[in-house]
Amino acid sequence: MEMKYHHLDDSKMSALQQHPLAKKLLDQSLFGLYALSSVLFEKQYQAAMNGPIGQCRKYTFTLPSVVPIPSSLHRTCPADEFSQKSTYSFDQHNHLLCQKIISFIADSKLKSLKWEKGKAKTTLPTLAVAKLLRKNAKDLEEVRKCFEKLKSPWGTMGSSHPFHSTGDYDYTSIILCFMIYRFEDSVLPRDMKYNIVTRLLPLAARDPFMLVPQTPVKVLDTENHLLMTNFSIYLTQVFADKYKLATGFDFDTVKIFVKFLLLEMLNAGVWGYNSRPFMGHVMVALLALYECCEDEEIHQLCRQQFYEFQVLDFIVFSFALGSIEFRRRAPFRRDTKKASKPGFQDNALSAMMQVWAERCGIRTVDGDQINVKLLPNANKAIFAIGSSYCPHPHVLLLAFTKTSEYCARIGHGPHSSPEIFTAGEGWLLAAGGSSHSKTDVAAGSTFVLFAEDNVKSIQQTFRLVHSSKNWKKINNTGVILNFAVCHGKAEAPPGTWPVHEIAGWSIFNNRGATIIMYQGKGLALLAVIDSLDSFHANVLEGFVRANGSSLPQKGRFHVPADVNCLATRFGITSFDYDVCCKQSEWIITAINDKLTDRTFYAWPLLDIDGRLWNDQADAFKFSQLYQDKASHECNPAIHALKDMDFASDDDEEGDDDNDNDDDSDDLDVHDNGNDTDED
């Protein structure tokens, strides 16, 4: 019996392909190609990770996240108490802070900047973005004349180093990509976009970028270069193909690797988390990709909820958990030379969040009171002004003010440091973290910030300073709810005096809360309790009765039952600690006689206890606070630790005489002083 075939014309075939079942079968037929390509890229990527030098990024760890994140796509109007009209796109008339930032940058002259040799690698295109946002005729003409003169790239993609001195052009190219996608033809004419693509962007690039160029051995390039370069290649290909500026593109090749990088951040977090200034470059790359809507799957990964959350929303939400009035300080990876900077707005997201809050109608401060010259990273905030992305208002409120009680832990995988934050009404307690020199992770002091305290430097806070003068030896992870302990000193802000003292114990009145501090031999303690108007001596005596006049470096702390604080409201009566433990362990060893999960290498990406907002119906609960052998056996990070060839933490911590060996960082092949902005 002869089989009959149905021949379909193009319109019928197109209609058939839209049928859900047919679409599913078609996707499955393509899955093998994508899976094979993904495996090949992953093998190349892992091989580069395991090279003798580079980021010391030996593995990509999949860490669970058990917390749903508010999506930027489901935005609601801000609360009624915010008087400013809600709007999400930049408006010159309503957004005074945005306008000030634009004017601050755009008032400079493009002709004063030199394109050659990358002397203005980010400054020139950033200035062009500011002028395009201001939209006056003089600015637009200045941008046109400037770009008419630019005939070729000033350098090449990838990290700059002694054997590749022309590198770092991807800092420029990703901003150019932002320009061609973000601005309509009435602002940036189509012919100018064509010139930018054909003359200044990597039109000839066809393959994914992974390795630092021109090195004697294979070296995986740093995260920001991987993102900026591969996003630039992809965005250039999409634009050039759409407007027929070039042919012969194999979109799947680069697109698969772009998706691989995005999924890696979703599954393992950002490698250079909280980095100064590299986190800003990562955000610029993501915002540029966000403006491209040509590929729905890429757009979903960058923008929409995917595996419960998406990259931009995850990064912004993580920032908000540890922020109050957009001030934040936390352990970070890259660049440890900046570990001594005392400020709270070094992260580019501090400035970006202020811009998004204003765009969202959340009036955080009168614009005429802001001196933009004193706002760090205003040059990165310009991309938050120009981008169509805006976080959920609830997340922006969380970054601005603390109205509920919660404790949040952010995991970053092996040989790294967790971030630990506790918040109460009007205050935030932040752990200093744990340093790891071999992976370029820097920790600092544990401190507390208060709403409207106008504190701009960590020296102005109540804080716990680790006893080691060497940043490589710090473990300052001893935060549990409103209590913190550390091997070091308890320090109060200059000019602050205790209300009452008993031996090593002291009590302070502060804005919206009361501070308890203890200083003993090798042990410091800080506690934030509910505000007291009187009976300070009685409260302090209660702490002494429960714990004695001196505390050991390893022991148990009893929470006085009659003290009003987070710990008592969360049911904690005692916790055990060891401030002299390994750098790979959480200082808190037990809570209410129950052993804790101290292996913070395997903590989830996000784990929260409490409520983030007053109107939150159900409180979060920690998913991995206590020891659980079964969950550890299922955790890929724990399994992979067995195969890692890093030196043990004991070896890393044990010999002060060898500290100088680590000062010549493996990362120098990437940095060479050229990874930072000119400013």
Image (tube, helix red, strand yellow):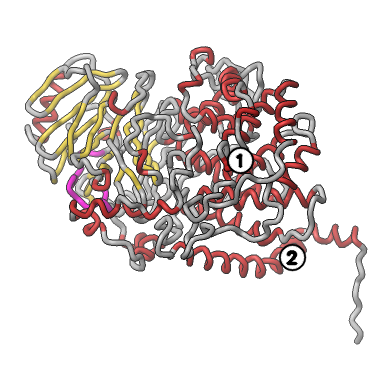
Residue 227 on image: x %, y %: 56, 50
- Residue named by callout 1: 116
Q: Answer whether residue 144 is visible to the viewer in this image.
A: yes
Segment tinted magenta in the rendering: 572-586
Residue 678 on image: x %, y %: 50, 35
> Position of 472 compared to 132: left or right?
left
Q: Is residue 585 magenta?
A: yes
> Position of 317 compared to 640: left or right?
right
Q: Nearer the viewer, residue 387 or 452?
A: 387
Residue 47 on image: x %, y %: 48, 67
Label 1, label 2: how many angstroms apart (C-alpha)?
A: 49 Å
| Residue beneath the point at 91% across and 71% down | 6
> Position of 49 compared to 555: left or right?
right
Q: Nearer the viewer, residue 485 or 154?
A: 154
Dot 1: what SS?
Answer: helix
> Position of 467 compared to 35: left or right?
left
Q: Nearer the viewer, residue 246 or 185?
A: 246
Image quadrant holding the N terminus, namely bottom right
Mark nearest the camera among 1 and 2 is 1
Q: Is residue 160 magenta?
A: no
Dot 2: what SS?
Answer: helix
Residue 72 vertical position relative to residue 210 in the rendered view, above or below = above
| Residue beneath the point at 25% across and 57% down | 649
Q: Answer whether residue 88 is visible to the viewer in this image.
A: no
- Residue named by callout 2: 26
Q: Which secondary structure type mostly characterizes the magenta part of the structure?
A: loop
